Image (cartoon, rainbow, N blue to C red):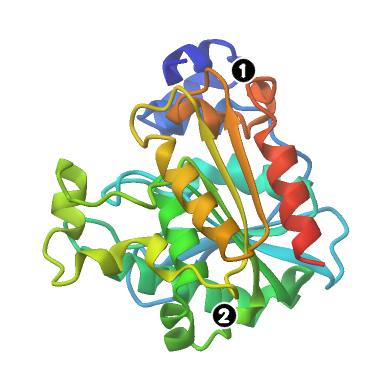
Amino acid sequence: MPLLAVLKRLTLAGAAAALTAACTPLSLFATLSPKDPSSLAARDQAYGAGPRQRLDVYAPPGAKGQAPVAVFFYGGSWDSGRRQDYGWVGRAMASRGFVTIVADYRIYPEVRYPVFLTDGAQAVKWAQDHAREYGGDPDRIVLAGHSAGAYNAVMLGLDGRYLRAAGVDPRKIKAVAGVAGPYDFLPFDDPIAKRIFGKTDDPPATQPMAYVTKDSPAAFLATGDADTLVYPRNTTALAKKLREAGVPVEERHYPGVGHVRILLALSRPLRSEAPVLEEMTEFLRKHAE
């Protein structure tokens, strides 16, 4: 379903103000979509010196230091996106009991691989250092993302070098969730992959598949069978490799769901599209115990 069609299904209360404040369909969706019960606990927190090294924190009602902590990375082909447009994801996950951090990260053309991963690791370090201030447990961290953000989340969970360099013990990552993510995309014949990853001297080292071990964190991997942007074979291949290594995996394929619809299914108005939110948060909560 096109995003503009989704917007037509939302209430138009406050639409004039939204149109003034936001100029993209996703910005409008973020403004007009009904919100889950949770709070924006902190806005525009710096985890680095750059303008895109900022994050927002969403907290569940009554969090008192024991809630699991989720760091969510949005997609956008590593060349677009802003955290303000994904507050509804933060609120959705917070309403399911997670202190949720939605982080910006540097994107192309300012940076290429692997700088967005080092940024992601720094955001996780911030989460570790500040979780208790918002009712979260810094020893129970999970990572989640959609599309390019799913790559970021899963890669950080599988390749512990980035977290260790940021001062985070990779064993603190109890689980990862990748929604419609690219994990197995060699050779770089896609224009996006070429510009983001094409200058690396070691293409196989860019692939999450290369870092699977028996000690990898549990993984929830979801895709829509109608996804023609990031093909479901990415999810299938990574889930198979993790399973073969003895890692707990939940693999979900949602019939008739495409690349954008699987993300929008996290929102209150569109949860009937696919049970992504419930299945993902149930899995993450279980493995964060």
Classify the position of the C terminus by image quarter: bottom right
x then y, percent, for residue 54: 45, 65
Residue type indicated by callout 1: Ala
Residue type indicated by callout 2: Pro
Quadrant in the rendering for residue 268: top right
Residue at image point 26% right, 49% down: 79
Quadrant in the rendering for residue 87: top right
Q: Choose between 24 and 112: the one closer to the eye.
A: 112
x then y, percent, for residue 214: 59, 73
So how many labels did they put on this image?
2
Neighbour tally class for label 1: few under 14, some 14-19, many 20 plus, Cα within 10 Å: few
Q: Is residue 271 visible?
A: yes
Q: Choose between 22 and 176: the one closer to the eye.
A: 176
* Mark number displayed over residue 204: none
Q: Which residue is mark 2?
A: 170
Q: Is 43 situated left or right of 61 in this image?
A: left
x then y, percent, for residue 166: 45, 85
* Mark number displayed over residue 13: 1
Neighbour tally class for label 2: few under 14, some 14-19, many 20 plus, Cα within 10 Å: some
Of callouts 2 and 1, the N-terminal one:
1
Quadrant in the rendering for residue 136: bottom right
Q: Nearer the viewer, mark 2 or mark 1?
A: 2
SS for dot 2:
helix
Residue at image point 32% right, 71% down: 50
Residue at image point 47% right, 12% down: 5
Which residue is the extreme one toward the front?
244
SS for dot 1:
loop
Q: Is residue 125 above or below residue 99?
A: below
Q: Is residue 46 visible?
A: no
Q: CA distance from mark 2 to mark 1?
A: 45 Å
